């Protein structure tokens, strides 16, 4: 990689009015950049890819993983549900469930899918069983929040509906309360950035949100999930997740802003939901005005690099908009037309 390319692709873009498009493209680009480095340590990544500040997408096609596949499945299910009226649990369940099952059965589902998602989707295949039977209540893997961006970006949702939707989509597969809380927090971060929040104001706003959520349980959406998880009450179930998220927010706040240090050393490797959120957020806060460096830093980590870069890319894209991403990268990423088309519909922007 030449110095010229490095400087060109790390230039801070002007923010634009397409945050949904930016977030969807960003998560796919991050996923594609981190997919080849997943399961590698940092020395191994550097040996394979060269200096992390110059990491590039694979050529000629940048292949995405199950992270983007499931995000698109969730987005398609939501659009189907929204086309039928106001979003509600009964209206969302069938189309989202069907999209997840279609993903599970697809021959393209060969991108290192998570075992929790596979086990849950096998149960979701049976329409006679309630979705709660599928939820893996012991699991808080990052598969819950790697795909949550559509809950933040679909237009017309109120704050409580976004929160409930983010948690419910997580619970379809990952029923641990921290998986739900971290997904809600990830979606809230994306929404704040899409609405123009400045990076320096994020941590206080996120802590206030987590404290406010406290013992809130979206019973209409989640049903008896708390009981299946073995908690004494709905509030106790919710609090268990939000307490872990508050602790991880403290770790982000205390982390030194050292761009050359592997972020996983500070906030965790990202295999579990709260660490995936926190480490992706740290990567974004290191380079809020340099979106490609956000992706590159997240992809060059010892942890779950594709999921970390996926979530970090959603943050960076929601903040800067579609302008965050160079056209030469976008034209190589798999599913770019669906990602761009969905984003522009949600941004209210004509496709072009």
Image (spheres, rainbow, N blue to C red):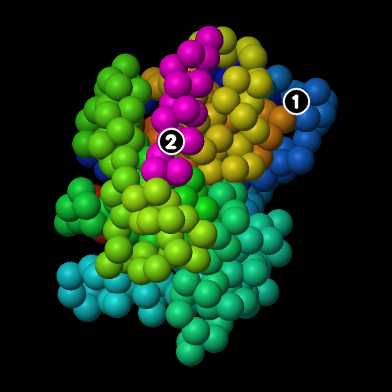
Q: List x then y, in percent, for residue 194.
A: 27, 38
Give the crowd class for mark 1: few <14, some 14-19, many >=20 residues within 10 Å: some
Q: Which residues are magenta?
A: 239-256
- Secondary structure under tag 1 reads helix
How far apart are labels 2 and 1 at the CA level?
31 Å
Q: Nearer the viewer, residue 214 or 286?
A: 214
SS majority, magenta: helix
| Whether residue 117 can be seen here | yes
Q: Farthest residue toward the front?
A: 232
Element carrying mark 2: helix
Label number found at residue 243: 2
Left or right: residue 13 compared with residue 192: right
Query: Can you see residue 334?
Result: no
Query: Which of these two is toward me, 259 or 296?
Result: 259
Q: Quadrant of residue 234?
A: bottom left
- Residue at x 22% of width, y 36% of height: 195
Q: Is residue 37 left or right of residue 308?
A: right
**In magenta segment, residue 240:** yes
Above or below, 151 against 79 in this view is: above
Residue 201 vs 338, above or below: the answer is above
Which residue is depicted at the point 70% across and 64% down? 110
Name the residue that disc number 1 marks. 42
Nearer the observer, disc 2 or disc 1?
Answer: 2
Q: Quadrant of the C terminus?
A: bottom left
Residue 266: in magenta span: no
Residue 228: image x %, image y %? Answer: 50, 66
Tell me if residue 177 comes above or below residue 251 in the rendering.
Answer: below
């Amino acid at each position: 990689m030449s110095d010229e390319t490095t400087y060109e692709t790390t230039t801070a873009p002007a923010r634009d009015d397409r945050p949904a498009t930016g977030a969807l493209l960003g998560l796919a680009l991050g996923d594609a950049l981190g997919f080849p480095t997943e399961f590698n340590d940092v020395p191994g990544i550097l040996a394979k890819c060269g200096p992390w500040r110059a990491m590039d997408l694979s050529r000629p096609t940048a292949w995405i993983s199950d992270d983007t596949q499931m995000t698109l499945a969730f987005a398609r299910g939501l659009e189907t549900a929204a086309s039928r009226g106001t979003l509600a649990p009964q209206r969302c369940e069938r189309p989202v469930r069907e999209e997840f099952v279609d993903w599970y059965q697809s021959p393209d589902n060969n991108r290192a899918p998570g075992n929790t998602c596979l086990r849950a989707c096998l149960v979701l295949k049976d329409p006679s069983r309630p979705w709660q039977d599928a939820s893996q209540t012991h699991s808080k893997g990052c598969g819950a929040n790697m795909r949550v961006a559509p809950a933040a970006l679909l237009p017309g949702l109120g704050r409580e509906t976004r929160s409930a939707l983010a948690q419910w989509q997580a619970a379809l597969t990952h029923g641990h309360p921290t998986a739900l809380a971290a997904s809600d927090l990830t979606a809230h971060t994306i929404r704040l950035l899409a609405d123009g929040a400045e990076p320096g104001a994020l941590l206080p706003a996120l802590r206030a949100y987590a404290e406010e959520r406290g013992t809130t349980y979206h019973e209409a959406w989640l049903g008896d999930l708390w009981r299946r998880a073995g908690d004494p009450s709905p509030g106790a179930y919710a609090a268990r997740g939000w307490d872990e998220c508050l602790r991880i927010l403290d770790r982000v706040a205390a982390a030194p802003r050292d761009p050359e240090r592997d972020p996983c050393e500070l906030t965790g490797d990202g295999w579990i939901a709260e660490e995936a959120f926190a480490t992706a957020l740290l990567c974004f806060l290191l380079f809020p005005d340099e979106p490609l460096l956000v992706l590159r830093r997240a992809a060059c980590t010892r942890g779950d690099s594709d999921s970390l870069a996926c979530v970090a890319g959603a943050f960076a894209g929601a903040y800067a908009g579609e302008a965050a991403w160079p056209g030469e990268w976008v034209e190589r990423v798999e599913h770019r037309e669906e990602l761009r088309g969905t984003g522009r519909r949600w941004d209210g922007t004509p496709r072009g």
